[in-house]
Amino acid sequence: MKVLVTGATGLLGNNVVRQLVERGDEVTVLVRASSDSRPLAELPVHRVVGDVTDEESVKRAAADVDAIIHTAAHIHIGWTQWETGRRVNVEGSRNVARAARERGVRLVYVSTVDTFGVGTIDEPADETSPREGKPNCCYVATKREAEQAVQQMVAEGLDAVIVNPGFMLGPWDWKPSSGRMLLEVATRAPFATPSGGCSVCDSRDVASGILSAIERGQAGRNYILAGENIRYFELWSLMAEVTGRRPPVFRMRAVAPVIGGTAGDFWTKVSGREPTLNSALVRMSRLTHYYSSQRAIDELGYSPRPPRESITAAWQWFQQHGYVHHVADAASVADAASIGR
């Protein structure tokens, strides 16, 4: 099978590409000229230089493929990058979807669990959960809008499946993205954690679920690809255990992060630059992003592994690739805690 992958240098996209190559597929990747070359080094893939926001380059990349996997996205937990978020996540997704429709091939569109409402430990959210209320950040808002655009095109004949990953950890996190949390815990051993929680899944398992969705997914259907629902306190404690660091001591009370988020919003208004810590991030980190993957388990054969395995694999990969004493752009762990990609 000939498959086009967007976002191939990201955590999920790179795992997808590697699994496609391993099973013998012919892989085309759409990459920007400025993209990091390391994730694709020595991989037998056909590279097309372009951008999802450039419809002509998307069409060139999709010219001779049998399926498209769209993982590329602009992730920002805040509101100041709204225009960029819409251009990439909404208009870019429309470009990819149109290319798939013109080719008459299946599209697997990668969204996020956060387009659904959050759940609880006893009642995790699923694909039938409501999407009511204002999204907490522009990333969730634009991904929700992009899903609506894809579903509208499905009604017009597009063959597409939507997958909604949870908080991913695993190897091949070059940027790093969600792996920043693990690196922060390993290098700074934070005393306190956000009060919320997330559904931890392995990037390798999500990639496998996506490959399965190409052949087994029902058109127009959403599939949550999540994992174990766990508080950030327990997750960071597990990370500390795996990396040999001191575990966190307590969960942050509500008032401290709210004050920090408010201060961040004030700084945004004064300076025009939005800091990592802002009110959108605080709201996201206080929620329990708990989800059920039962539909994907039943229909796609999705099989999420325990968080310890994902943490261990990610930590070993970071050690092998020289990340242990480096934390990308000094980003806050709370940023990584919000949404992993």
Image (cartoon, rainbow, N blue to C red):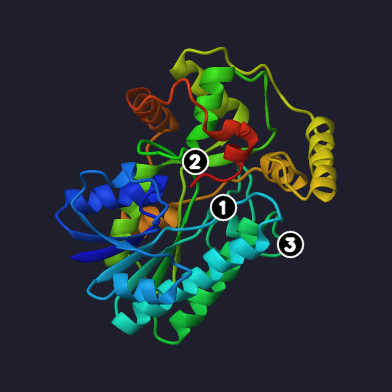
Q: Confirm or deny contact between disc 2 and disc 1 (CB under 8 A).
A: yes
Q: Position of residue 284 (x, y in %)?
A: 68, 45
Q: Looking at the image, is 140 positioned above or below residue 333?
A: below
Per the model, the C-alpha gap separating discs 1 and 3 is 17 Å
Residue 161 x, y percent position in the rendering = 40, 68
Label 1–label 3 contact, CB within 8 A = no
Q: Which mark is residue 177?
A: 2
N-terminal-most mark, 2 or 1: 1
The circle drawn on residue 14 is none
* Amino acid at the residue labelled 3: Lys
Pick the front one: 214 or 173: 173
**Where the N terminus falls, by quadrant?**
bottom left
Residue plotted at (36% across, 81% down): 101
Residue 130 visible, this angle:
no
In front of the other: 123 or 148? 148
Which comes sooner in the sequence, label 3 or label 2?
3
Q: Residue at x 23, y 54 (%)?
A: 20
Which residue, given by chain and number where applicable, does mark 1 sit on? Answer: 75
Tag 1 secondary structure: loop
**Spatial separation of the CA atoms under disc 2 and disc 1:** 10 Å
Question: What kind of element bears circle 3?
Answer: loop
Image position of 303 (left or right of 187): left
Q: Position of residue 2 (x, y in %)?
A: 20, 66
Sequence-wise first label, 1 or 3: 1
Mark 2: which amino acid? Ser
Front-lying residue, 240 or 174: 174
Q: Taking the image as drawn, is residue 172 in sight? A: yes
What residue is disc 3 on? 134
Horizontally, residue 58 falls left or right of residue 246, namely left
